[in-house]
Image: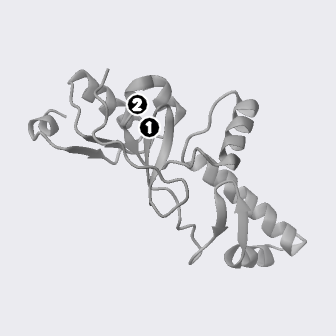
Amino acid sequence: MKDAIASNPDAFIAFSYPPDTIALTEQAQLLKFNPKVFYVGVGTAFPLYKGKFAANSDGVMGIGGWNAESPQLKEYLARHKAATGKEPDRWASSITYASLQVLQQAIEKVGKLDRTAVAAEIRAGTFETIIGKVKLKDGLLQEVWSVGQWQNGEFYALAPTSLPGARAAVVPKPQWQ
């Protein structure tokens, strides 16, 4: 971290996992290292991150994000909190749920539990999910959020900007409190 500070960068980017994501953020705050862009990897979209850093999460970027204005995701958030007592993460949780919706709809379209037919339907079909329409390309979900940012207590999706609900980045990020 001290080497990063010494270089006086405009951006700090770490493709980190949750323990390091937390540690890097703590160290940046302790050392008063506040570049215009602060991006840390996996874990930034977790409720744990927002819970630990509160207002200091504001402006921090990371992997993932979601369209927080989506009625389907607002409903999902409420149902998740009611079922578990906790908020979901703002990245993989909704995609995982959407994948189960795809599976359910594929089984319903096929009309029976036929693995080959269900797999073919998943490859070819289009499905309505909490993250919007899902249509696989080359067997993959390719239109997913890659960058998000905490803004006023919510982890909004920033990129790709072509997806509905993309927000503009807040740069420079607010100073650590």
Q: Percent from the top left, x then y, of residue 90? A: 55, 43
First in sequence: mark 2 or mark 1?
2
Give the camera-side residue of 143 and 86: 143
The location of residue 83, given as percent across then percent down, is 76, 33
As drawn, is 173 to the left or to the right of 166?
left
Q: Quadrant of residue 38?
A: top left
Identify the residue shown where x is 38% and y is 31%.
Answer: 22
Q: Residues within 10 Å of mark 2 (few under 14, many from 20)?
A: many
* Residue at (14% x, 32% y) in the render: 2
Q: Is residue 151 left or right of residue 88?
A: left
Question: Where is 121 relative to 104, above or below?
Answer: below
Judged left or right of residue 177, residue 96 is right
Q: Residue at x 53, y 32 (%)?
A: 47
Q: CA distance from mark 2 to mark 1?
A: 6 Å
Quadrant that contains the N terminus:
top left
For mark 1, does the 10 Å Cα neighbourhood hold few (<14), some (14 to 19), or many (20 or more) residues?
many
Q: x and y percent of residue 45 in the render?
A: 49, 40
Q: Is residue 135 visible?
A: yes
Q: Quadrant of residue 23?
A: top left
Amino acid type at mark 1: Trp
The residue at which mark 1 appears reads as: 150
| The label number, if any, that marks residue 61 in the structure image | none
Circle 1 SS class = strand
Q: Amino acid at mark 2?
A: Ser
Residue that badge 2 annotates: 57
Q: Are marks 2 and 1 in contact (CB under 8 Å)?
A: yes
Q: Position of residue 80 (x, y in %)?
A: 71, 37
